[in-house]
Amino acid sequence: MLELLFLLLPVAAAYGWFMGRNSVKHKELKGRASITRNLSSGLNFLLTDQEDKAIEQLLELLDIEAATIETYLALANLFRRKGDWDKAIRIHEKLHQLKLPKPQAQQIQFELAKDYFSAGLYDRAEKLLVDLVKSPALAEIALKQLFSIFIATHEWQKASQYSAAVDNTTSKSLRIAQANMQIEALKSQSQLDTKQVLQLTEHYPTAIRPKYELAQLALSLHDISLAKSALLYLVEHKPQWSADLLPLLQQCELADEEWYQLLSKLANKHHNITAVVLLASWLAEHGSATAAEQFLLDKLKQQPSIRLFQQLLQIRQQQSAPAAEVLSSVKELVNAYLDKKSLYSCRNCGFKTRKQYWLCPSCQQWEMVEPISGIDGR
């Protein structure tokens, strides 16, 4: 009897292992079936435009199966693009509560901050982004999103708190944004002075705004030497801005030869319309109207431009008294045409305007709105 018992023990063990294995498989199959049911139910709700019920169903599934995070992120981003920020927030908040690897958790935190920003919950978004500025992988995009908040709330002074963080990135656009927001902060506090602006020009040499503000401030204080230095630097490095810079340089008492050389370089090398117009005026004043007219005709053949034609009409009107009345009527038509044309265009998004903006009203990028070139340009 005892021997029989020992013989049956391996059989009992094998049976127990077999039944246990089947039990585990049964539980796995049952769990998978439950997941499939919840997922199918959630998708069905989405297809029948019952999005709130769909989200509830899918969030229940999230507790069971965290391996589908990318699917949930895609779904939340879809809701955000559609403007359903509350739905995107609910999904991202649920994901944010999960215990995930740090890189994935930080990415979800950033997406949640973007949701809050889109929904106008700036305080919540800022709180999440401040932590992410310390992340090497997300520091740059977190700073850009933070700066978007400061732009929306006009809290320019907050940008200076992140000067060191901006310096640690390789982003040119962040440095330009930082320089502009510090200028805005100084202007809002009526503290714009030469020393502070000069420091900004040295710290952010790629930004146009500090040099431009320095030149205007120097002109207002009759510091011609400082204004001239700042403007000549800008013309050298940003010739596309000549339409705005040259009228300021005219106030800097440049010698005739220096003014001629500057205009010649901009007109011939950079094909700047404003420089051509001013050079034609200089030739008419210091040479002859005939030389100025011939210069304009040559330039018009190379570079058709309404503004050059306008200047040619003016010179011919001064030369010929009998034709002055007819030319005056043509000039009025040209002036009316140009008065309706945009003067500036954003090179990032194409926004057009007659007014200068340091911050593009359309794409919210700094120093992208530049004087327009081309047949109607300056």
Image (cartoon, rainbow, N blue to C red):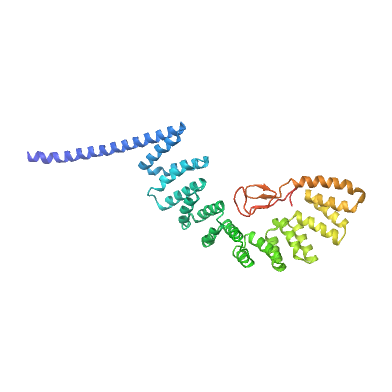
Quadrant, the N terminus: top left
Which residue is depicted at the point 13% across and 38% down?
Answer: 8
Q: Position of residue 158 (x, y in %)?
A: 53, 58
Q: Quadrant of residue 62?
A: top left
Residue 366 located left or right of residue 107: right
Q: Position of residue 193 (x, y in %)?
A: 63, 65
Residue 304 is at least partly visible in this image: no
Q: Position of residue 263 (x, y in %)?
A: 77, 60
Which residue is depicted at the point 52% across and 41% down?
Answer: 83
Residue 281 located left or right of residue 368: right
Query: Foreground residue, 296 or 96?
Result: 96
Q: Quick one: which residue is furthest to the left in this view?
A: 1
Which residue is depicted at the point 23% across and 39% down?
Answer: 20
Q: Quick one: which residue is furthest to the right in this view?
A: 322
Q: Position of residue 107 (x, y in %)?
A: 45, 50
Query: Foreground residue, 29 or 286?
Result: 286
Q: Quadrant of residue 38?
A: top left
